[in-house]
Amino acid sequence: MRSAVAVVALWVLAATGTAAEVDHVGAKGTFQSGDITFNVGDAYAYRSTESGTDRAVVTVVVSNVGILEKQIDRWLDRKQVFEKRFKDDQTAAIYFDFSPEGTFRGISYYLNSGNGCGYCSGGDVQSQVKLAGGRLTGPFSYKGKDRSWDITLDVPVAPDDYGAALPAGGGEPGKAYLAFAAAVKGRDAAALKKVLVSRRLQGMAQAEKAGQIEDFLSFVAEKRYVDTVRVVKGFATADRAILTLEGEGPVGKRVGQVLLLKEATGWRVDDEILDIAWGQ
């Protein structure tokens, strides 16, 4: 167990920022659901579509901790990042949907067994939230039998500019990602070194030095559950690329995304998320 924890730390610490990067608090207030109550620590807003419809909304994620905006901005599917890279037993992610005009539409969240909401709309929500100048600002509150909140927002809507669209297969970033996927599947440490970003290589080198390279390879491959994977689409700037993915394996279809950085040696994989393809 100790070696597994150490390997996780080598990977996670290389990707996360510091508290000093949280230079703006996007929300304040309180949230209560069932027997859980917390003070709001921050918020993050991004454009999306309302659950079960194609209606455009702005989703605001409210948490009990600070949110490093730049770490979330890099990804296409922001909710997947909050669910797979942010939320845990001690860190909440409550999703509020607002219309492009700032009107409250609904809420969804899961805190623990029996304490959550797949998507709840309606109710007597008191809101003065407005969307102007690329920011959602103003208070909104609700008091009901199962949940209540009193929150004031001052949160910018995240940018949606990921760069130019890449050709079919993801171009050069796509080739680098497929090499990464093959190396992970084959547990090929030498091949993996050729496609990881430098900060990941630092963690890999530490794992090798500690005699934990097999643990490192197992961690990188953990919960991917894919035999085959392909690039669906992608976008890139001069030094950063984001690709969306589809895969299949022993647990069925998977969907996800991968971040790559352009380094002196070429495109290199920074982080990958694969998850169950719900409803597909």
Image (cartoon, rainbow, N blue to C red):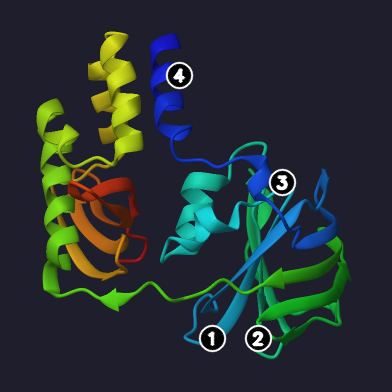
Please tell me whether residue 198 is drawn above or below residue 118 in the rendered image.
above
Image quarter of residue 225: top left
Q: Earlier in the sequence, mark 1 or mark 3?
A: 1
Q: CA distance from mark 3 to mark 4?
A: 23 Å
Q: Nearer the viewer, mark 1 or mark 3?
A: 3
Residue that carries the numbered disc 4 in the rendered image:
5
Furthest-bottom residue in view?
A: 101
**Residue 1 visible in the displayed image:** no
Report if the CB atoms under discs 2 and 1 are less than 8 Å apart. yes
Which residue is located at x 17 percent, y 44 percent?
180
**Residue 29 visible in the displayed image:** yes
Residue that carries the numbered disc 3 in the rendered image:
65
Q: Nearer the viewer, mark 4 or mark 2?
A: 4
The 10 Å Cα crowd at callout 2, few under 14, some 14 to 19, many 20 or more, is some
Name the amino acid type tagged 1.
Ala
Residue that carries the numbered disc 2 in the rendered image:
99
Q: Earlier in the sequence, mark 1 or mark 4?
A: 4
Q: CA distance from mark 2 to mark 3?
A: 25 Å
Q: Residue 233 in the image: x percent, y percent?
A: 23, 71
